Amino acid sequence: MAGIAGVVVLSAYVAWLDHRIRGEFEGARWAVPARVFARPLELVPGMTISADAVEAELKIAGYRQVRAAFRPASFERAGGQFRLVTREFRFPDGTAPSRRVTVSVSGGRIAGIEVDGAVRRQVRIDPAEIARIYPAHREDRVLLRLEDVPAAFVAILLEVEDHRFYRHFGIDPLAILRAAWTNLRAGRTVQGGSTLTQQLVKNFFLSPERTLTRKLNEALIALLLEWRYSKHELLEGYLNEVYLGQQGAHAIHGFGRAAHYYFGRELADLDLDEMALLAGLVRGPSYYDPRRYSERAMQRRNRIIDRLGERNIASAQAAARARREPLGVTRDPPRASTQFPAFLDLVRRQLRRDYPGRVLRSEGLRIFTTLDPTVQRAAESALELSIPLLVRRSRIPDGEIQAAVAVTDARSGEVLSIVGDRDPRRHGFNRALDAVRPVGSVVKPAVYLAALAGPRFHLASLVRDEPIRIDGPSGPWRPHNHDGRTHGAVLLRDALVHSYNLATVRIGLDIGLERVRDTIRTLGVSRPFATFPAMLLGTVELAPIEVNAMYQSLATGGLRQPLRAIRSVTDGHGRSLAHYPERSTRVAHGGAVFLVTQALRGVLSEGTGRRAREILRPGQALAGKTGTTDGRRDSWFAGYGADRVAVVWVGRDDNQPVNLSGASGALEVWARLMRTIGAASVSDVAPRGVEWHWVSRDRGQRIEGSCVAAMRLPFVSGRLPPEGRCGAQTAARGDAAAS
């Protein structure tokens, strides 16, 4: 009876164990993460890009620089000439095969392109994979399908770990006996008898404790796995589950992630010596850690290479060549997750609008984003170079200054770069999306646009920059200028260029607060804000990405385009699931926007942003506006060229004064960024319905261009200032120049 009871109990236990491992193993195997890609690098002759930028883009995309490029994802460089072999890649519009490409760069431009020996007008290089979205369990994985793993690596792994894998049934008695004999002769444990299936069990199902019960469970589960699943499925599970290292609190599981962690590349892009090193880590990732114990790791790798040569898995020549190679691991391991956490945060938010989390975790989506690695790198560099200078200017402790940057394509509304922290790799609070702060004078272009869109005002209108008192429920409000002075009657254009608060308030009250509020909203601000006079000077609270949306509408000439971080999404088979087309809506009078843009050019040439002239490239004519809040708690700069819109915020998380104005803080970062990316100048070619005239600086009347006090300004047709004369006190421009 005891024997029968034992059989019943054992059968029940086996049935329970079988049910458990089926649920856990199958659920994990098919939870394929969504892969997130940057935009592809599309090169055309004449395109502005430096040779160093091309090299940086290739490296971000996981291309390896070698002496002679003949494998996919490798490149060689000789000065401004690049020879590379692209990867086969499935784009949303079809699969591109691997190609041999030659790119020549000269004078900061693409001089020529050849693809497979033929001259081409364009080439598209597969994009960098910037993230994988999957559940976080303090493990970092890059899940692989067996068909995507190089056959050479499978052969190496089986030779090293379990060369009888396809001949045993989960446990291998011959391997156990061989290991026992070897260990007995050595007097210590030098060899294990576990099969690859048993190793999978140890990694996936069991704790690391060494007890007889655990060993029995290991053998039993291995037998059940072999009964339930094919060798193909078990090998695939092992490739994704085996433990291969530790990065802080994150365990490195699977050869896909290990290839990134140690070499910064895909497993399919590794050479023989690198594959041998990865296979050798299985025995002891900590003991053979190539970054900490390079000599030990080298010996282990070379023993494996020798064995491959002896078994004819690699040719003698290939083995000899692999033995001579250095370890080749990257000096610093990549972050356990994306290099671009702030941008990925925006991607996640846009995905949540369209896909449930269940689909993102299980369907293996391919998400093609708008991230431009060159612009992202420029934004990060501008911050890195500027922060030390801002610390000295502010005279506050270094660690207390924070910053955020948002850059978009002026034509399409694509988000090119997001930096949410002065340390762009830091995860956590994303200031570019979530730091909602008063924007100060950055809001003023909306005030002036509201005025210029109506019939009463033009750029040469005289407005009073004089003291004003406004009585409200909480008492009188007496705004003042930042310089503490008043300037009398000034041109409307100069009031914006020099950011005169008193003139701005008078204009806003004259046209009506509701009209200004509606203009701010139509430019792209959806966040609610109170409508009261202080709004005219920037008490409106917005995040940098929201300010960018507002300025995007100015950069497009009055067309509002929703900002987007995603171009398209496909499923694991390449079928399109969603496409994010460009959409635009006319929200402002194009002529009035042109007038505002020309005034904002003046901000950078002679107004509050003139410091930018010391940083921007010669002849780089951009438009923008400084912003400083009460007590100098926030430093803003928002501006654009013909092709790029960028917003920078500098401040402190505790809302204490940062002691920087928009000109002395955020402008520094913005100008460095726009110089580096070569933002194109805004055009001064008037749109239909706008005409240029000379006006007098003091009276705002139309005069001859030869007058000394003449200034050329654009006007909407039919809304022109009155005619005037040079005046007795002025001389002809030619006479003045001669004197």
Image (spheres, rainbow, N blue to C red):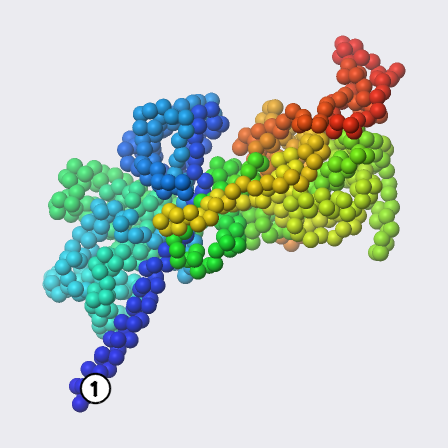
Query: Left or right of 319: which side holds 669?
Result: right
Quarter of image, res 444: top right
Q: Is residue 467 left or right of residue 584?
A: right
Q: Position of residue 553 (x, y in %)?
A: 64, 39
Is any part of residue 718 visible from this angle?
yes
Total labels: the figure holds 1
Please indicate whether residue 194 sits to the left or right of residue 614 in the image.
left
Residue furthest out toward the bottom: 1
Q: Which residue is mark 1?
A: 5
Q: Position of residue 466 (x, y in %)?
A: 86, 38
Dividing the image into 4 quarters, which one contains the C terminus? Answer: top right
> In which quadrant of the rendered view does residue 19 lie?
bottom left
Q: Residue at x 20, y 55 (%)?
A: 161
Rendered residue at 41%/43% (across/down): 92
Q: Position of residue 276 (x, y in %)?
A: 24, 47
Residue 259 in the image, given as x and y percentages of width and height: 32, 48
Instruction: Determine the image quadrant of residue 197.
Output: bottom left
Residue occupying the point 43% across, 30% down: 43
At a point 46% along the width and 59% down the height, the residue shown is 357
Where the N terminus falls, by quadrant?
Answer: bottom left
Q: Secondary structure at mark 1?
A: helix
Q: Is residue 448 visible?
A: no
Who is closer to the viewer here, 571 or 362? 571
> Alpha-carbon neighbours of circle 1 within 10 Å: few (<14), some, or many (≥20)?
few
Q: Which residue type carries mark 1?
A: Ala
Above or below: residue 1 compared with residue 21: below
